[in-house]
Image (cartoon, rainbow, N blue to C red):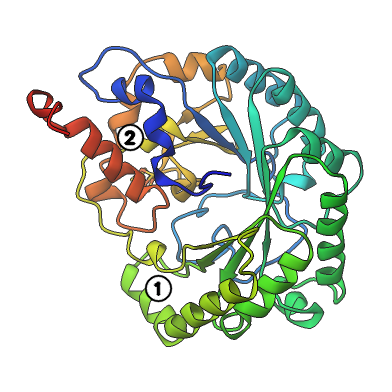
Amino acid sequence: MGTIYSKAKVLHYRDALDRLARNVEGICPPIHIRIKPTNACNQRCWYCSYRLKGVQLGQDMDERDVIPRDKMMEIVDDMVVMGVRAVTFSGGGEPFCYPHLEETALRLANGGVRFASLTNGSRLSGSVAEVFAHRATWLRVSIDGWDDESYARQRRVAVGEFTRVLANMRAFKRLNGPCHLGAALVVDHAVAPHVAELIQRVCEAGVDSVKVAPCIISNVAGENNEYHAPIFDEVKRQIALARERVGDGRVEVFDSYHLQLETFEKSYRWCPYLQLNPVIGADLNVYACHDKAYNLEGGLLGSLRNRRFCEFWMGGKDKFFRIDPSRHCNHHCVANQRNILVHEYLDADTDHLAFV
Ligand code: SF4
């Protein structure tokens, strides 16, 4: 198996990369779209960026929004026709709270679009779990308590949910489908001393990979770094310990803990990734990216309320260049390193390309 979290995946889409710049004719369909089918969630994580005050992400989110079934089917049909390669369902809310998730996933699969989801795992059962096990490319369960009590505190849910989520994960693996099951650990002060223990628990539940990432508590890099500084070394020690414990190479432990704390300042003036991996929100708005979702002033590309997705996307290039990352994106950005890579690729002097 190759490297799942590689930043270089985008370099395999040269046709799309070569059409990104403003002065080049043509618009490429997104390669990968994040869809937030519903803003309803059955948990209440304290650090949830969509509900945390003072973080620009999610500042205009309405928890009642949900993509109506017929509109969702229209969007899926457009994505199939446009040649979109992949869809990830994510929050806003919990994707498995969306009543039409199974139907949407099947329609994508039957149209040749790969799909995946982030989830809290609490509703990972029944026929929707079967569809994901056998047709999805990957599923990532976010988890951060290390036992029933801590999980209940972190997520403000009933004691016993942690055990139930781990049981859902084990049952999902027993369905024996090809879907890659991952876990995402969001690290805060409470979780930090338990990272290795939690990684071991999710490995015992059968996950194929674990991603460790920091909770983001502010738009300001310095405030995030300040929050994480007292636990930084401990988290690194815990990750190393976990790697020793699960050292058979079957499970990839991906350390995303440091990277995301250094992505706030941008030097580039336009964002390649907003054309490659935009977001469709439950409010039927298209946003530049996951880090600007539900920010109407800073992240909105346009609305699908009265038009089809393909009509909106292919109708002119100007909308992709209103955001200047050097001015408008001085906050957390999961695509920053990939944006830098794409800019380097596009900026290479053509006279010198042969001198690899
Ligand atoms: S630079 Fe980052 S935060 Fe800004 S629009 Fe692009 S992906 Fe989003």
Quadrant, the C terminus: top left
Which amino acid, by three-letter code, is at mark 1? Asn
Which residue: 87% across, 45% down? 175
**Residue ID at (72%, 25%):** 109
Residue 44: name its quadrant.
Answer: bottom right
Q: CA distance from mark 2 to mark 1?
A: 26 Å
Q: Place residue 244 in its image quadrant.
A: bottom right
**Amino acid type indicated by mark 2:** Pro
**Vertical order, 131 against 44 (above or below):** above
Q: Identify the residue shown where x is 22% and y is 31%.
A: 346
| Residue 282 shows in this picture | no
Q: Which residue is at the front of the view, 239 or 155?
A: 239
Q: Nearer the viewer, mark 2 or mark 1?
A: 2
**Residue contact between numbered discs 2 and 1, judged by CB atoms under 8 Å:** no
Would you name the residue on which mark 2 appears?
A: 272
Q: Is residue 67 left or right of residue 324?
A: right
Number of numbered discs: 2
Identify the mark at residue 161; answer none if there is no mark.
none
Q: Is mark 2 within 8 Å of ligand 1?
A: yes
Give neighbour class at mark 2: few <14, some 14-19, many 20+ (Cα, 10 Å).
many
Q: Is residue 310 left or right of residue 177?
A: left
Q: Is residue 311 left or right of residue 275?
A: right
Visible in this render: residue 250? yes
**Figure check: 137 above or below 42:** above
Which sits in the foreground, 112 or 334?
A: 112
| Disc 1, SS | helix
The mark found on residue 224 in the picture is 1
Of helix, strand and loop, which one carries label 2? Answer: loop
Say which quarter of the image contains residue 101: top right
Residue 316 at what x, y percent from top left?
35, 16
